[in-house]
Every structure is written in C-alpha cells, then in structure tokens.
Amino acid sequence: MQQGRSLLKLFDLLFDQAPLMVDGFDKEGRCILWNQECVRVFGWSAEEIKAHPHPLALFYPEEEQYKDVLEGIASADGEMFREWYPSTRDGKQLTTMWANIPLPSGDMLCIGHDLTELRRAENQQRLAASVFASSYAGIIITDADNRICDVNPAFTRLTGYARAEVIGQSPLMLDSGSHSRSHYTRIWRHLIKHGGWRGELWGRRRNGEIYPQHLSMSLVRDARGQVLNCTIIFSDITELKRHENELKYQATHDALTRLPNRQYFSQHLERALDRARRHNGLLAVCYLDLDGFKPINDRFGHAAGDDVLVAITRRLQGVIRDSDLLARLGGDEFAVLLGDLHDHGECLQAIQRMQQTLTQPIAIGQCLTCITVSIGITLYPQDNANADTLLRHADQAMYRAKNSGKNRYQLFDPSLGLPERRHQQRVEAALANDELTLHYQPSIDLASGDLLGLEALLRWPQPPHGLVMPVDILPMMQDPQLVSSLGEWVIERVLRQLRQWQQLGISPRVSFNISLQHLSQPDFSERLEGILARYPELSPTRLELEFHCKDTAEDVTALANSLAHCRTLGLSVAMDNFGTGHSSLAQLLELPVDTLKIDRCFIKGLLSDERDVVVVEGVMQIARRLGLTVVAEGAESPAHCRRLQQLGCYRAQGYGIAAPMPAERALQWMQQYQSPG
C-alpha cells in the first residue's frame, strides 16, 4: 500500500513538472489536474481553475468556439493531436496542440503543447519568402564563403542574369570596373566591423551596361558571432540620378538660354581663382549689359525679347573659347570668364569679338534690330579680390561704360572704387553703431484737414555738418547684403516706433521706402513677413511700402510678384517720384500699385509753369481711371496747397504742411494737430 501511494506521488510530481501542458477534467467538466506548465502558459493558478465550475469557458470565451471544443473532445478522433486556439488570462490567443485521453473512470486527461511562437516563426518565414520573391529590389544571399547561394526574381530583372548562372559565384562577378579593389576592401572592413554597409555603387548588367545602384549589405551571424550569411539588397537608381542631375542643372542654369546662372558662374570663378593663384595666372571677369534691350520688350513683347536673348547667347558662344565660361546673370545681363590669358591684349581681342558679333542686326519677325553692349572688365591679379568682389567690380565698370555713352567697354580701376568702398564701410559702421535715425513727414487731406499718415525718411546725423540725406547714402552702396541690412533696419525701426505710438493711443499710417536692389531679392517678402511676425500687435494695414519708379527693373514680372506678396501681407504699395526716371504707363498696368506719388519737380512749378499743371491733371485723370490714390509731394507753401485743391488733388505732403521731424517732435505734432484749435 505504501509503495502504491509513493508511486502516485511520483506520478503527481511527474505531471506537475512536465515540460508539456498537462491537465485533467472530471465528467462534470471541472478541472482536477493543472500542472505548472499550464500555470505558466495560461496565467491561472491551479486553485483558481479547480474552483471554477466551467473552466473551459475561460479558455474559449466565444460561445461558438466553446461548442466546437466540446464537440471535438467528444468526437471519435478526440484522442488525436489537434490545433486549438485558447485564450490566456490576459486575453492573448494562443496556438496550441492538444490530445484528449479518456480514462476508465470517465475523467479526461489532456496533454498539450504551445505552438504560438513556432507558428509565428513559420508565418515570418512565409512573409520573408513572399518579400524575397515579390520585392522590387534585387536581393542576393551569400554564404559564409561569400558565394551566392540564392537570388530573388528581381535580381534577374535588374541584372539580366538567371539564378542558375550566379549560384556559387562571388558577387564581384557583377563588378562594373568603376571602383578600385581598395574601395571594396574598405567596404568589406566596414561591413565586418559594423555588421552592415549602405551606399551607392556602379553595377554591371549581363549585357555589359553600367548603371548606378543603391546597395545595402547586412551580415547574419550565429550565437558565437560567426558569419553565416550576407544579405545584399540593391536597386537601380538610374532615374533617380537623372532626376537629381536635372534638378542640379536647373539650379545652376538659366531656363531660357541654358547658360550657367550667377550661382554656377560664382562657383566656377572661385575655382578659377584658386588655379590662378597657384600658377600665377591671368584672368578677366567681364560683365555685359545689352544696350536698348528694354524697348524691344516694350515694342515686340517678351516672347520676342526671349528670342533675342537666345540669339545673343548663340553669338557669344560662337566667339569665346571652349575654356571660357559664358553665363546669364538675369534679364539682359551676361558674364564671361576669360581664363588662362597670356596678356591684356588677348583679353581685349576677345572683348572686341563680342562687340563685333553683337552689332550684327537681329531679325525679329519681319523687322531687323541692332543691339549693342556695354562691357565692364576687371583683371586678376591687378584686381586682387575674391570672386564676388571681382564680379561686382566688373559690374561697376559696366555702369561706367553705360554712363560714358554705351556700346563700349570699360576696365575697372581699383583706385576708382576706393571712395565707394570707404563710403560703404562708413555706412556699415553707422548701422552697427546705431548712428542712423528716421524722420517723419506728415501727409494730409487738404479738403478735410485729416491726417493721412507719415512717411519715414532715413537720416544720418553727422555733427557739425548736419543731416545726410538718402540721396547721399544709397547711390554709392554696391553691396546687396548691406542694402538689405539697411532696408530691414528701416522696417524694424518703423514697426518699433509704431508700437510705441500705439501704446500712447496714436496709430497713424506710416510709409517707408525700399530700394529696388533690396525689393528684387528673392527672399524679400518672406523676410518682411518674418519681421512683421515679431510685432503681432500691429496691423500690417497701417504700413505702406514705397519704391522709386526711377529704379524700376527690367524684370517687371519678378518685381510685380514681390509687390503682390507684400499686398497679401496687408501692406499697400506706392510708386514714388512718378513722372521721372523710367516710370511709364506700362508699369502701372503691370505692377500692383495702390498709390501714385507725383514727383515734387512737377508740384514746384504749378504756380508758374502751365506744363506742370498739364502733367498733374494728366496723372490725376489716369489715376482715377485706374482706381489709384494720388499724393502730391513737395507742397512747399499754402499757395501750392490751394492750387492742388483747384486741380482736384487733395492728398499732399511737403514743407507747406510740415517738415520731416524726429519721432519725438512728430508725436508732439500729431497730438497738437489732433487737438481742437
């Protein structure tokens, strides 16, 4: 008897510690056996399961599933191993294999095994096999000896090699010959050290074609760290490279003429300068501007102008050397880099060839037109400057050629640029030391007396000489970055002053001037938007941007886009000094303008010159037809103000109303002006 009880205890221990799940149920379905493996897998203790009246319902909570299990256990093949899908205590569904063995007593002994991880691994293998077979990228698998043991169908599509042709071969059979052995050695060392490598290589197809590929390699190691396999995944990036090259080309070339643009020219000039410094070389930077090109656009249209620019390009390409570089800088401006020159005479011969070829008539439809060119030249190493400065010096020399009568060339003299450089340095110092200031001049409605706004005017106090005006500050400034910095300083100061006045309960409209050089920069409107964002309490509708019509660019489309963006921000736009410089009726139709400011030279003569009266009346009539506001500048006396009212011009500014004044006095003026009496 004692021996029998010992045997039963041994069986209990055996079942309880068995690595398989072992449980038992009596005829009523109650659990009578629940070993440790069942506890580990399902999460319920033996006491919890044995106390439950229907424990199978815990494992199979869905009624339909529960019925299937009961029918399966009672069926004739219930003793055979079958897959079941019970749930654990935390709701996780398992994949298990069970055999249900009926005992003579009517009870049931169940032996099971958890197959969840095995099935997951099998599914992952199926998924991996599916990815391997259907992947658009080519896949190579090599063994520990770096021999190809498998490839996928995409490999054959990309390389042209059948699977049977490459099995047992080294992946180097696909070598294009474009890379050195040392390059592959470096890749292999990186692969061994880091377990993977990715990058771009040149591959070779079965037909000998060389193509770019993006390639990724990963090592598969065993538990001891020994390499078992290497997986190589690659794709053909020919189209990607072509698109990338197209984008690079577009970024560095002019769309119309297909010439290099300013960015490309500057980069090439940098490299040419490096070579010239190393080899004591001589080179020339030439800045070309076509004379009389704008009338072609005005008369024949922009399409005809584009045809002329293409024709000019072809002619210039025909007279420069293959080693020289021709670029289009924008509009009708070109640059030529003449490198490896033997002497100055060789440069001048090249310039003369350019002039001669451009003087030949150009056909525009049924008409012939002639184009001349003004050329500025600077020579290195006589002008020992950096690339950007050399181009700017050539530009300055070109302007001297234009001012001297056009259709000629002008050599840059470094000594002639000294005053400009000194002036620029002084302006830079003044800006850095906060020496500049703004004065404000009111404009009013002559009929009602209402204050319309203030114009912010740049001033540079220089005791004891007094105030330096913008006309003496801006013309000599050639550095676009300095021009931008000065313009942004003005905008920032205007906004700061507006905020101070608003805090005092006064919110006038304020206009400020922006130079064309600043306004034409591609990021002007975005930078303006950033400055405005720093003053969220101010409404942009209180601001007006003014530009001088004498500065208007030939690239009117770019200028119009920039002004239009400013208007979307809430600003209004005024064309200043209308009637002078390059202003024209065509510009009024092309540019998004809200206000015309009649130049003071016409207002000054209203009392004595009937021709000025005719001009003012004409501007007023045009403005009314176009829905524009007109402001008369230079109303220097009460008599001028009365004459303007007689002509129907009621908006004016000038010394007859108030002189420009510092912000403190402008505040006092507004407070007094708004006061009764």
Image (cartoon, grey):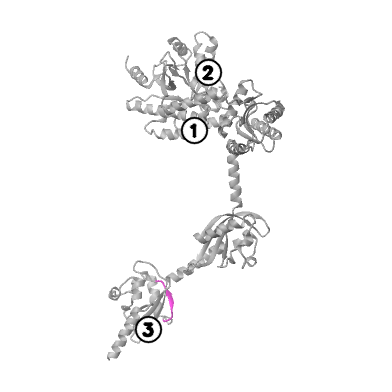
Query: Can residue 338 be seen in the rendering of this structure?
Result: yes
- Is 357 placed left or right of 88 in the picture? right
Q: Quadrant of residue 136?
A: bottom right
The residue stretch that appears in magenta: 79-85
Q: Quadrant of the N terminus?
A: bottom left
Gap in angstroms between the C-alphas marked 2 and 1? 30 Å
Q: Nearer the viewer, residue 417 or 202?
A: 417
Q: Quadrant of the C terminus?
A: top left
Nearer to us in this view, 401 or 156: 401
- The residue singled out by tag 1 in the image is 524
Question: Which residue has dot 3 on it?
Answer: 102
* Coordinates of residue 568 in the picture (x, y in percent): 47, 33
SS under mark 1? helix
Identify which residue is drawn at 41% across, 82% down.
79
Three-letter amino acid code at disc 3?
Answer: Pro
Q: Examine the image and state in which quarter residue 652 appears.
A: top left
- Per the image, the residue denoted by label 2 is 619
How packed mark 2 is, by other alpha carbons closer than 10 Å (few <14, some 14-19, many 20 or more), is many
